[in-house]
Amino acid sequence: MNKPLGFAAIILGLVASARAELKLPAIIGDHMVLQQKQSNPIWGWDKPGTKVTVTFAGQTKSAEADTDGKWTVKLDPVLANAQPQVLAIAGTDKKDIQDVLVGEVWMCSGQSNMGFTLGRDWNGDIEAAASKDDTLRLIKVPQVGTQELKNDFNGAWKYSDASSSSSFSAVGFMFGRYLHKILGVPVGLIDNAWGGSAAEAWIRRDTIEKDPRFALLMDNTHQHEAQAQTEKAKADYQAAMEKWKQDVEKAKAAGKTPPRAPQSPEAWLNGNARPGNIFAGVVNPTLGYGIKGVVWYQGETNAGRAYEYAQLFPFMIEQWRKEWKQGDFPFYWVQLADLMAEKPEPGDSTWAELRESQTKTMKLPNTGQAVIIDLGEGRDIHPRNKHDVAARLVRWALVKDYGQNFPYRSPEYKSVDIKDNKAVLTFDTFGTNLYTFDVDEARGFAVCGEDKVWHWAKGKLTGKNTIEVSCDQVAKPVAVRYAWSDNPVCNVFGVDGLPLTPFRTDDFPMVTKPQPAPAPAATTTKK
């Protein structure tokens, strides 16, 4: 009887020993870059109650592993350093993190246009071939969608070279390379983008649940979650799969492109649109790592809910800042590019409304927007020119965060003065003058009268920051819009090459504003 008990005790002791091993998250590893001039958290896991000591750059910090085994220390701020250093950690055992640099760290987030790799850029082949640099470091976070908070991921820091850069975010990489070359310090980039992702998936689930502004979003989520887990949903999916297989065979026989496979209920539950999924599986494992800021390219998935996005997007930024506990760190994004067919007549647009919601988000401190309505492709949601996107985005960081002197902000609408049949628009030009590309006429404007019917208007520059617009069909205009369409035809820039930000002077109801449910039909009772 004693032998089995003794053997069990040995096994339990081995298990406990394995659990007590000093462990570190993937984000803290060889070749990492620490953010200069700010306190940097270093964390991991060890046996509860164990004293863990971290030594780096002449300083030593200690912490005790809590009841869950988690420990965290904060390193004092240090200056940028391109000389490799060792970060030594001692607990139940020892780990030396090799080749640690200090410089600037940026997170690159969003959906597919941020995830769009360098290798797919128009010049991606030569950009990758020229990317070898051992003081520019890259790490990618895998796409894991879950409601369970993850504390780690499979990944590792790598030197920038043709292999690592070509599979990295094109916008993120070129943004970071500009910083690296201009500032002359090491740069670390974290790529955690997920194509097709919705903004609500990037936010901690319980925070969005508690905010009454998003009650409709969460009501729809709860219904979707319940429906996706029914036997009927599973049966419907199986039937759809059988039909899809038949359709694929028919398409092949006819020499046509096969249709896409239907999405399983589990795919949505574990995917990139369910509120909280990406935060739990992708953001949380890196939460707290010392960063300078975030660059963001997302919004396409939320375009049909642009009205909601005006609150959801700034909410996400505010929540990330609270979660990171680094204050109002810089957060810069790319406004939606032009897409879809050019429309012959002016009118409403969901994409224009999403762009407006993005512009409104600049009310938050330390935020900025790169306008790219001239860089899109009408038939492709993924424009291949990411170089110019990154160049416009990095201007914000260079000026606002690093004290450089460059043009950085697109002209923006300031005011309108309407007299008779003319509207004179005044713009904030941020030190530049307005310029019309290709032709003298300022194109892309529309006006309407009291009837709210939009007509194209002629525009002309009347000063360094003013444009006069008029239309023969509108005797008394009441509102003006510019570049207000999915794929606008417009040509107003600053002389520095940054396009005028799309805008409207009206406050007409948005087409993406949720409509109240129709009242139930009246019923009569027969006697």
Image (tube, rainbow, N blue to C red):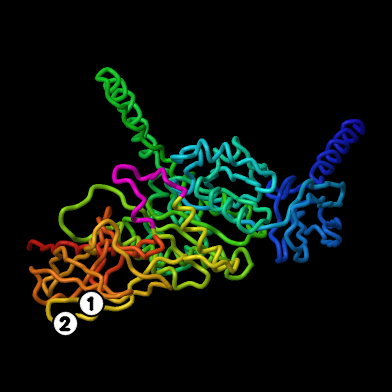
In this image, 430 relative to 100: left or right? left
Indicate the position of residue 245 as horizontal and vertical percent values. 33, 24
Q: Within 10 angstroms of label 2, few (less than 14), some, or many (20 or more) residues?
A: few
Indicate the position of residue 340 as horizontal and vertical percent values. 27, 47
Q: Earlier in the sequence, mark 1 or mark 2?
A: 2
66 shown above or below 383: below
In this image, 85 relative to 267: left or right? right
Is 386 included in the stretch rendered in magenta?
yes
Indicate the position of residue 373 as horizontal and vertical percent values. 34, 56
365 shown above or below 342: below
In this image, 128 relative to 434: left or right? right
Going by the numbered disc 1, the residue's amino acid type is Val
Q: Residue at x 20, y 73 (%)?
A: 479
On-image quarter of the N terminus: top right
Q: Which residue is mark 1?
A: 424
Indicate the position of residue 399 as horizontal and vertical percent values. 54, 67
13 shown above or below 345: above
Magenta residues, start to end? 372-387
Q: Could one spot residue 507 in this view of the protein?
A: no
* Residues at circles 1 and 2 in contact by the CB criterion of under 8 Å: yes
Main SS class of the magenta portion in the image: loop
Q: Could one spot residue 334 in this view of the protein?
A: yes
Q: Residue at x 61, y 53 (%)?
A: 181
Res 182 → quadrant: bottom right
Numbered circle sitting on residue 419: 2
Identity of the residue furthest to the top in this view? 253
On-image quarter of the C terminus: bottom left
Going by the numbered disc 2, the residue's amino acid type is Lys
Residue at disc 1, secondary structure: strand
